[in-house]
Amino acid sequence: MSYDKPIPTQGTHTKPFWQGASEGKLMLPRCVDCNRVHWYPRHICPHCHSMNLEWIEGSGRGRIHTYAVQHLAFGVWAKEAPYVTAYIDLNEGDRMLTVLRGVDPEKPEDIKIGAPVVVEFEKANDDTYIPFWRVVEE
Amino acid sequence: MPGPLYKAAAIVGAAEANEIGFLKTPITALQLHIEAIKNLSEQTGVAISRIEGVFSTGWSTELCEHLGIKPKYIDTTSVGGCSFEMHVHHAMAAIHAGIIDIALVSHGENGHSANKIGGRGASNYARGAGALSPGVEMSMAYGLGSAPSNYAHAMVRHMHRYGTKREDYAHIAKVTRDWATLNPRAAMYSKEKHPFGGPITVEQVEESRVIAWPLTILHCCMVTDHGGAVLVTSPKVAASLNTKPVWLAGAGESMGHGNMLEMDDFTATSAGRSSQAAYTMAGLGPSDMEMALIYDSFTITAAITAEMLGLAAPGEGHTLWKDGHAAPGGKLPINTNGGGLSFNHSGMYGMPLLIEAYRQLSGTAEDGINGDTGKQTSARTCVVNGTGGSLSTTGTLVLVADD
Ligand SMILES: [Zn+2]
């Protein structure tokens, strides 16, 4: 079945991320001068304002920072409701948004802030593999 | 004789993006902005982190978020090619007023590259901002859209951090409805006015339909129609009018992020900074405030904002409502019109806040009928706080009644 939900439009400076994603790698922008990872990808380091940026392969691991269960959704996502959205604290620092996998949207109290998650990629089209995060055992 | 703004400010540097003209490699307008700002910083030796005011044709949120600036003054005047001269004018006024010392006026426009970037949705993407900024690129796949879908994440984090229960916040919806029942112009004034109007209980709030867990529909504001306006004048003009003045004692503004992906602390907003600026300007503090008007897009918005305004300790915002202080007859009335939850919320609720603040402090808030005591309070001071976006931007005013 083909991917029918919204697919990101790729930017002029985010190609390494999408290239990595198609190879199953979570590529993250890091500042060469202050060594810090940031997300989303910038033209300039938001921490020290250096423009000396590079891409590194992340561990693909993180933890739940917070979450919510979407009961009222729109467009193609409506047929998926309820589903759990979450912000993920990356092990490398900073935060990503996801639709969380490996959880029961009918039991939101069972989802634990701080629970470990790993990334996985779903093919949306030939150029776009979208990262999603799944709750795993500690 | 020179006017009061004579030499009130100066332009101290000017720079451009690395490459300009007909660029071979298409570039976004966002990148043109960022390169010029970086070069300006190097030319002047003024670190980007020292910028206090950001002036641009609609780009200021995007620029502040991208650069990590927490501004004190945000201007997005966009009225064509003369906008930038106006930005300088506005910056001059803000500097003269003592609100900021360092203002950035920025421009980035890819008239040539825009035609080469994109395809579908090219006009948006080509700009590299707003609907298709890199932040949106990295969040658009994940089924968030409406305001509650975003705000629910803050509520879960707030509950986790402070050990509160959803029911604690439900008191905010219940008490705010109590105010609405004193205001015949409130959409939820009565059962006669609206099938779901009239008083509600905490249990009803809890048991209503789930929109984005933990938010049920009665934790959410309405979507209505509203029109309003206020007039601001000099003291001299104010003295010549028949209406009572309500004095602007203090004002402040700031932002934390545009996209919720960039919200550092899900239990706090920039209202901490914007209210501090407003209190400082007024020479007053939270304990001097006799009432509050707080944008209550959701119950969680009101709870967090009350904490940010210093009206309650962190994690205890909801107790103002739960313990009855914010309710009719309470010691700190809040959202006396019935709020965005039960009075009116057309999408952007900042104007109803101003109107109710004027009415309360000018003694014209009495809408009671048929012997109702109505909603007029005896407050002489009021803190007003608007919140925009996804708990993104805040503006705070401290208002005082005329002597
Ligand atoms: Zn850096």
Image (cartoon, coloured by chain):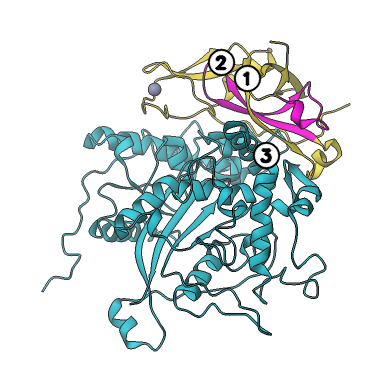
Chain colours: A yellow, B cyan
> What separation in Å lies between label 3 and label 2 (alpha carbons)?
29 Å
Q: Residue at x 34, y 81 (%)?
A: B238
Mark 2 vs mark 1: same chain?
yes
Q: Earlier in the sequence, mark 2 or mark 1?
A: 1
Front: mark 2 or 1: 1
Q: Quadrant of residue B244?
A: bottom left
Quadrant of the rendering where the N terminus of chain B is positioned: bottom left
Q: In the rendered image, which residue does mark 2 sit on?
A: A91
- Does dot 1 land on a helix, a strand or a loop? strand
> What separation in Å lies between label 1 and label 3 (alpha carbons)?
23 Å
In this view, the residue farthest toward the left is B1
Q: Is residue B67 above or below residue B307?
A: above
- Does dot 3 land on a helix, a strand or a loop? loop
Q: Is residue A41 above or below residue A28?
A: below
Side of B124 relative to B25 (left or right): right
Side of B114 relative to B82 (left or right): right
User: Residue B172, percent across and down?
Assistant: 64, 54
Magenta stretch encompasses residue A98: yes
Q: Which residues are magenta?
A: A83-111
Quadrant of the rendering where the C terminus of chain B is positioned: bottom left
Q: Nearer the viewer, residue B227 or B168?
A: B168
User: Residue B385, percent across and down?
Assistant: 48, 57
Magenta stretch encompasses residue B99: no
Q: Residue at x 59, y 60 (%)?
A: B348
Q: Which mark is residue A63?
A: 1
Q: In the rendered image, which residue does mark 3 sit on?
A: B165
User: How packed is label 3: few (under 14 Cα within 10 Å), some, or many (20 or more)?
Assistant: some
Q: What residue type is disc 1 on?
A: Arg
User: How packed is label 2: few (under 14 Cα within 10 Å), some, or many (20 or more)?
Assistant: some
* Chain of residue at mark 3: B
Q: Check whether the beta carbons of the residues at disc 2 and disc 1 lie within 8 A of each other.
A: yes
> What separation in Å lies between label 2 and label 1 (alpha carbons)?
8 Å
